[in-house]
Amino acid sequence: MKCPFCGKDYLTQEEVMTCVLNHVRESQEEQAKQSQRLNLMLMASQLTMASLATHSSASEVVERFGEIYELLESLTQKPNVVGEIEKWLKDRGGGNEP
């Protein structure tokens, strides 16, 4: 029996399945790495554009990004996302009070 990915010969179907599963796992790990690289490139691009557009220092932009990221991460389990964002903005003086 041969592995359909690498063509290596095995004596049992169990050995072939183990090899196939290893190939699938390696492929998933590579996809995760590529996805992480892409996300980092997108984040770097967004932070660069924010820094240029606001004439802020890179450290200020990164600090603000960290604050917003923490907010969004905390919202994953909350039912009233809009209300939480409005509260967050108000607490930081960025809301539109009447």
Image: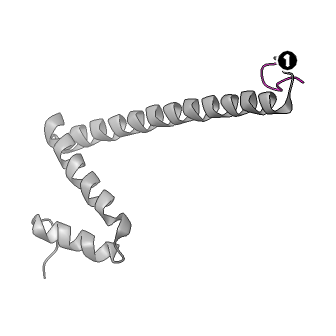
Q: Is residue 54 above or below residue 17?
A: below
Q: What residue is shown at x 52% (from left), y 36% (from top)?
A: 32
In the rendered structure, does residue 6 fall within the stretch colored magenta?
yes
Relative depth, front residue between 39 and 97? 39
Question: In this figure, which residue is indicated by the disc labeled 1?
Answer: 9
Read off the magenta span.
1-7
Tell me which secondary structure the magenta stretch mostly adopts: loop
- Residue closest to the far bottom: 98
Residue 34 as seen in the image, left or right of residue 28: left
Q: Helix, strand or loop at disc 1?
A: loop
What x and y, as percent, mark residue 28? 60, 35
Quadrant for residue 78, please give it.
bottom left
Question: Would residue 65 be visible to someone looking at this image?
Answer: yes
Name the amino acid, label 1.
Answer: Asp
- Residue closest to the far top: 8
Q: Quadrant of the C terminus?
A: bottom left
Residue 35 as seen in the image, left or right of residue 13: left
Question: How many numbered marks appear?
Answer: 1
Q: What residue is shown at x 13% (from left), y 78% (from top)?
A: 97
